Amino acid sequence: MYRDNSLMPKEAVRLAVLGTLIQNGPQRYADLAGALRHFLDRIVGPSLDLMGTSLEMLRYEGLIEALDGTGMEDNALLGATDAGRAEFDTLMRANVRAPSADGLNKLVIALKLRFLHLLDVESQRDQIDHLASLCETELARLGDLKRASAGTDGHFADWLEHDIAQAEERLNWFNNLLSRL
């Protein structure tokens, strides 16, 4: 994790693996690897940062275990260990970095929302409240940029208005989700 306790690519992949196993139960090695690759590729596209974490490393660290067989070579059934469940809980409660256009941030938010229902309701509220706060910070940043660049030529003002509208829509979405919990 970064110094601000936000997730790095390695932790995002861990969250994806552990959340998938906790949510869906044990899965065959090949099925789990294929499902993760599909999800990660669709959220952030092909990424060398995300390819580095292997299921074998998570097995070695004691976060997942082979319930039958040994691993990749015999397509073992994999499940989360107690240590893996504790790691999942820690990762779900980790911070999300301030909004940006990077794919990692989008992946972390997508993973939190994908597995949010696995946390208790109070923790779900805390996470959604944090995400809404990030949107508010982003809106303040974009509003400041809009004021500072008022009167400039080109298409920047239109693009900025579009970005502000998206941030407002995200904030409304998170606030609506928070009210439904």
Image: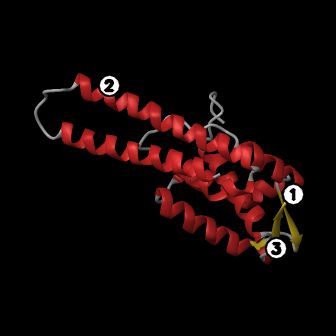
Residue that appears at 49% across and 59% down: 43
- Res 36 → quadrant: bottom right
Q: What's the amino acid at mark 3?
A: Leu
Q: State the CA–CA distance, disc 3 to disc 1.
A: 13 Å
Would you place residue 96 above or below residue 84 in this image?
Answer: above
Q: State the CA–CA distance, disc 2 to disc 1.
A: 47 Å
* Disc 3 secondary structure class: strand
Q: Is residue 95 left or right of residue 151?
A: right
Q: Earlier in the sequence, mark 2 or mark 1?
A: 1
Residue that appears at 28% across and 45% down: 162
* Disc 1 secondary structure class: loop
Q: Quadrant of the N terminus?
A: top right
Question: Is mark 3 in CB contact (under 8 Å) with mark 1?
Answer: no
Mark 2: few, some, or many residues within 10 Å (few <14, many ≥20)?
Answer: few
What residue did someone put label 2 on? 144
Mark 3: few, some, or many residues within 10 Å (few <14, many ≥20)?
Answer: many
What residue did someone put label 1 on? 81
* Disc 2 secondary structure class: helix
What residue did someone put label 3 on? 77
Q: Position of residue 173 (x, y in %)?
A: 48, 50
The residue furthest top is 148
Q: Position of residue 61 (x, y in %)?
A: 82, 50
Closer to viewer: mark 2 or mark 3: 2
Observer able to see residue 54: no
Count the numbered circles shown. 3
Question: Is 1 or 53 nearer to us in this picture?
Answer: 1
The residue furthest left is 153
Q: State the CA–CA distance, disc 2 to disc 3.
A: 52 Å
